[in-house]
Each structure stands twice: as C-alpha cells, then as structure tokens.
Image (tube, helix red, strand yellow):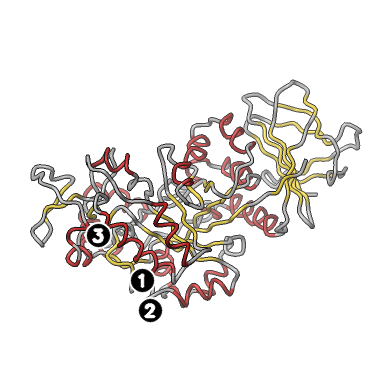
Amino acid sequence: MKHPFHQIHLYEIGSRLFCVKNGKQIQDLTNEIQKKTLFSWADEIWLMGVWKNSPSSQKIAQTMPELQVGYRKIRSKLKQDDVYGSPYSIYEYVPDPLLCESPDLTDIQKWFHSQNKKLILDFVPNHMAIDSPIVLENPNLFLKTEEPNDSKNTFIHPNGIRYYHGKDPYFDGWTDTIQWDFSNSEVERYHIQLLKKIAKQCDGVRCDMAMLPLPNVFEKTFGKKSVYHWKNIIHTIKEEYPEFKFYAEVYWGLEETLQTLGFDATYDKSFYDSLFHQNLEYVYQSIQKRSSTSLIRFLENHDENRAYDTFGLQSKTYFGLLSASPSTILLYDGQELGLSKKIPVQMIVADEEEPVPTIESFYTNALSIIRKRSKSLEHNDIQYFEFNQLPIFARLLYSEYQMELFIWNFNQVSVSGWIPYQEGLYYKEELTDIVSGNVFSQEKKEEGIYFQLNPNQLQWFIF
C-alpha cells in the first residue's frame, strides 16, 4: 500500500564564515550561494549567525584558554581577529555589519523567495550577550541573584546588579551571556515583540536550546517557576504570520513536548545518537514509522563533529537512510564535500580543506536524484523473500519520472534474498548502486531482484 511521502530539505550555512571567505556581504553573494551544490536541493536556507555580534563575547572568546586548542586545529596561523565571538551570544536582533549593512534582511528574504526558497534565522530564547543594550533598557527582565560566591555562573553587570549567566541544568553558565528571567511574565511579552520583528524578515526561526524555558527545566536549573509559555508565543506570532515556522533545538527526550506546544519541527537527536552508537535496530524502527517533517534529522550541524569525521564512508549509507525517511533533513555547508574539521562557531576564518572525491561524487549524484522527485511523492514498504529469515529495510519511493528502491541490512550478519517485482519495479539487466557506485548484473528470475547485503550496507537503485 502506498503512503504519502514528505520531506523538507534544510540547508545550514555559517553566514559569518561564508561572507568573510568571499570578502563580501550576504546581499552581494547571491551568485555564490546559487553555485552551492546544496542550494538547488534545499527548500529552506538557514543563515546561521546573522545577528549583531557582542564585543564582550568576542573578547571572551579570544582569551579563553580552553577554546584555543579548537581554534588552532582549523587555523594554522591563528590571528586574534580570526575569533569573532559566539553567534549565540547575541548583542541585538539586527544584522551584524560584517554580513549586512541594511537594518533588516527583508531584501535577502525577497531574493530567496524569488528562488522558491524560504529563509530561516536564529532565535535564542534563553539568553542575550552580557553587554546587550537590552539589559540597560530592561534590567528586570534578566535573572538576578544574591549568590556572590558563584563566580562561574554569575557576574556583576555595570548597572550594579548581579545576574546569572545563561545556562542549562547540567553545565556551568556560558560566561558571555546573561539569563532571561522566565519567572517574570514580561519576558514572554518582550519575546513576542522580538519575534514579530524577526518574522517580518524571514520565514521561520531555529530556536536555540528551546527546552530551557520549560517550567520543569528552568526550575531544575535555577529553583524558580517559569511562567514562559511557548504555546502562547507561537500562537500569537502565527496569528499575524500564519506560515511562519518554529524549529526547536531540543534534547533530553523533550521533542514531543515541544511539538505539542506548537513547534513545527524538533531535532531528532536520538536518531543521530543511534547512528553514532550503532544502535541500528532503533534506527530501523525509527524509519519504519510513518514519521513526518516534524522531525529534523541530520548527520552533522555546527554543534556536532563533521559527518565524514564521525562516520567516514558510512556517512553515504546514512544519508541514503535519511533520503528514504519522511522528515526534515538538515545538511550543513561542507557536508557534501566530505569536510572533516569542525569549525568553532566563534571563528570567522578557517584554513581551506580539500574535498573528499568519493563523498563529493556521491552527494552530486544523490542530490540530483532527489531534485528529480515530484511533489506528489509516495512510498511503499515492500515485502521480500529472505534466505535466512532475517528482516531488512526495503522501501520504494514513487515519483512522476522515477522510482527509487532502498534496501538496508541493519543486522549484524550478512543477509540475502529476493525483492519481488511489483508496480514500478521491473527487470533491468544492470542496476547501479548510488551509494557504492557498483554495477550489478541481473538475471531475469520469477522471484524478482536478488540482493546480498553485508551488515549495515545500504543499496539505492533508480528505475
């Protein structure tokens, strides 16, 4: 039985690195963006790190000893100005002059719309930069403390008040940030006004650490009751901007909680962790479910190590699994080249890295296939005949001009058997596997198409 198959393709670009590398601001780089392999694949572009940089964050990032090792791994001749500060320690929600001199990004959004793409930007609900002018204007919106001995998590602001740094319940605070006080109902109203300004210039926000304002999480972190309501915030914004999207970076099994509060999609970190730890049975169960675009699945992003560094050539198999899974798929700039060095978010310059030809070739072919899919896409999980009674994952994707067959062995031993002929699946003398590039000769048999798969091997064929 066929079922509707939906994917959203989300492409993350590190805006600061991109602009500095090309020596131009974002509005002057549209031609360079269009040349990107991932651009034509993507439905939405997440320009990460566009908001105004904090001078204090830059100074802290430049001087923190524990960050220097990461910097030097990707910059052999490190200069102080190569370190710009964290894009998640936001000074103000206006474009950083390094990227854009305009007061907003509406012209950039219009250009993306002309290319049939949506623009996603960052929103950081938990904290601001310690030197943000918002603190001086609204000192009571941030979390005060009487803990003078907690130097790792608190600081005295120039206004004379001791505040908490932004933090989560498991680690010390981020020393370049100041914590919003979610026990103050005015914070919710202030955030609604911030988001209305953001919604005028983009199509959605990726909300950083979106679970931190939740009542139980905030109380666990600071011992105070949160009166911050994501449901009300999202509903209020969508009343004025119905198509505006909210994406959540979320961990600790709170994905469904945030979806019930109105988030359009949430990180599926459990899926990534299962790939990392080779819990393939969990991966199989996940992709067997009729999941939807409410799950954001990825092999890397700016927080994780590079996919090629983590998974090696097996990253091709895992991208094939993503391509066969109804979800929102996140790809990070450089993933399609097999780049392996994780660049700290504080950096705006990195040494050039050579692409990996086998990875680059694979993504070129795979993305070309995905681009040819029609919007009226359907899938069917097919039955097969096995020789050794072990299950495999076998899925057909039906599109107007092509059909894709995915076969994946998630078992710890080799599996072989037959995929029976059915609608769209017909005899071909030769089948080319998109993942390995290998060509398989086939004899016409009544049983169907023969397969033989090693453990954790995926084959992806086009008909």
- Which secondary structure, mark 3? strand
How far apart in space, not on screen, are marks 3 and 2 (Cα)? 22 Å
Residue 204 vs 222, above or below: the answer is below
Residue 377 vs 136, above or below: the answer is above
Residue 372 lies in quadrant: bottom right
The percent position of residue 51, horizontal first and vertical second, equals 35, 66
Q: Residues within 10 Å of mark 3 (few under 14, many from 20)?
A: many
Q: Residues within 10 Å of mark 2 (few under 14, many from 20)?
A: some
Q: Which mark is residue 254?
A: none
Q: Which residue is mark 2?
A: 102
Q: Residue at x 63, y 54 (%)?
A: 361
| Amino acid type at mark 1 | Pro
How far apart in space, not on screen, are marks 3 and 1 (Cα)? 15 Å
How far apart in space, not on screen, are marks 1 and 2 (Cα)? 7 Å
Along the line of sight, which residue is nearer the eye, 340 or 235?
235
- Which secondary structure, mark 2? loop
Q: Which residue is mark 3?
A: 129
Callouts 1 and 2 close, C-beta under 8 Å = yes
| Amino acid type at mark 3 | Ala
Q: Which residue is mark 1?
A: 95
